[in-house]
Amino acid sequence: MHELVEFAVEKAQELGASYAEARFEEKNGTEVVMKNGNPEGLGILADRGIGIRVLVDGGMGFSSTNLLTKESVFDAVKRAVKLAKAASKVRNKPIQFSEESFHEVFYEVRMRKDFRDVGAEEKMEYLKRIEESVLGSGITVPMRFLSYRDFMWHKIFMNNEGAMIESIIPRVSITYNLVVLEEGQMEQAPFVQRAFSGGLELIEKDEPWERALNDVKALRRLIKEGKKPPEGKVDIVISPEVAGIAVHESVGHPYELDRIMGREAAQAGESFVKPEMLGERIGSEAVTVIEDPTIPNSWGFYLYDDEGVKARPRYLIREGIISEFLMNREYAAYLGMKSNASARAINYNREPIVRMANTYLAPGDHTFEELVEDIKLGVYMVSFNEWNIDDRRYQQRYIGREAYLIENGEIKHPVRKPILEITTKGLWSSVDAVGKEIEMFPGTCGKGEPGQGVPVWMGGAPARLRDVVLRR
């Protein structure tokens, strides 16, 4: 494969490309599914190919092939060059890439318990443990969807500017969807996922069977004890899970520079953020939002992006100030900046575009008890059932699933479906304190045309929001 990616880059230059890159990707893995205690079968993932991207006269072209012969790769190179030449004729401004330093690197995430050494029946045992944990609780859970998935993700990236990056990253996940039925009422924990880059030891340490048990207990308590939430201006404490979806949707997406510059308008939406907003205040001094692909064993982990740029933490908001956008080489060049390694593709047959990896609300200096103790009337929102955000990522709504009344500094009974409707600036400006402990939650972030769902983490520390409007 090293020979083929080098061949592709050389042939693209011979055909007139001023810039050329080739990216080989291979994925191999398994999936097992259980529904209501019954195994539903075994899935096998086996996929590999090469994607080629070129610049010719300021136009960009991309092509791919899963036939790994020199003849097929050369045909893909010719298609990419032809597309780039056609694109150059209709562009008002030629595409340029930022100047970057490149390396020759191999890196690998090691597994203490290699899932390739474990059979499908043993992997199914993880799902059986969830099943037994939930059913052994005495709670009626009539619908139980459980899945396990793993895959090895092998990449080789090369360009004509000196990059040669090879990586091997194992990824493993468990997902469950549970419905609780008590007293004729139904509540659901919709598709909870636990996911990591690494081996089975991470699943075993995480104990998703215990998390599933806690979820069904919380749902039963909500059915039996849940009351209406307060309405009007109150204080809210949001958990790391709720903080995570908020930073992902109202900070990560609108800070993608391709979206800011208009590329995503007809695909994944626009952004209220403009390039000249760098340095503006968007939240209180308590708010710092970091985007970091280098977190070990994270679901969105990588050390070099799919343009060969070395990854680092990106501070999107620093103490309430907009300090950085997510950028690839193309859009960084528009602002005269360097890329911050935000280019990602989900497969060899997709072009790399600006994406998130692991986005979180940075920890503060408060204990959880301190966040709650001086709230006279409020709500602690632990998890959400639903979120909505507008096309420009400014107006948003979060509907709580597990949530509790806070009264005179104490957490009381569950409340049903509290609704937080707020603007992005209003949300982050209302934060007056952030907790010390962080927790991360996996997701699949969708974007692009054709669509690309990439693995990400989102989360952070709990936070206290003062005098925000709660609806029900």
Image (cartoon, helix red, strand yellow):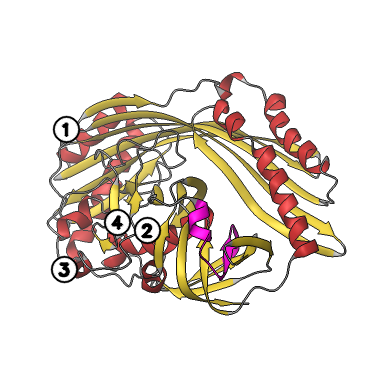
In terms of image quadrants, where is residue 18?
top left
Q: Three-letter amino acid code at disc 2? A: Gly
Disc 3 residue crowd, few under 14, some 14–19, many 20+, Cα 10 Å: few
Q: Pick whichever of labels 3 and 2 is earlier in the sequence.
A: 3
Task: Check if residue 27 falls in the magenta segment.
Answer: no
Q: Are marks 2 and 1 in contact (CB under 8 Å)?
A: no
Calculate the distance from the C-alpha at mark 2 to the C-alpha at mark 4: 8 Å
Is 260 placed above or below 57 here? Answer: below
Tally the marks.
4
Which residue carries the number 1 mark? Answer: 162
Is 273 placed above or below 96 here? Answer: below
Assign the C terminus to one quadrant of the image.
bottom right
Assign the N terminus to one quadrant of the image.
top left
Query: Could you tell me which residue is drawn at 53 percent across and 27 percent down?
Result: 199
98 on left or right of 50: left
Calculate the distance from the C-alpha at mark 3 to the C-alpha at mark 2: 29 Å
> Residue 385, position in %: x, y?
62, 62
Q: Three-letter amino acid code at disc 1? A: Gly
Query: Could you tell me which residue is drawn at 73 percent across and 38 percent down?
Result: 130
Q: Mark 4 or mark 3, which is nearer to you?
A: 4
Q: Which of the two residues, 365 or 179, is positioned nearer the viewer here?
A: 365
Q: Pick whichever of labels 1 and 4 is earlier in the sequence.
A: 1
Which residue carries the number 4 mark? Answer: 316
SS for callout 3: loop
Q: Are marks 2 and 4 in contact (CB under 8 Å)?
A: yes
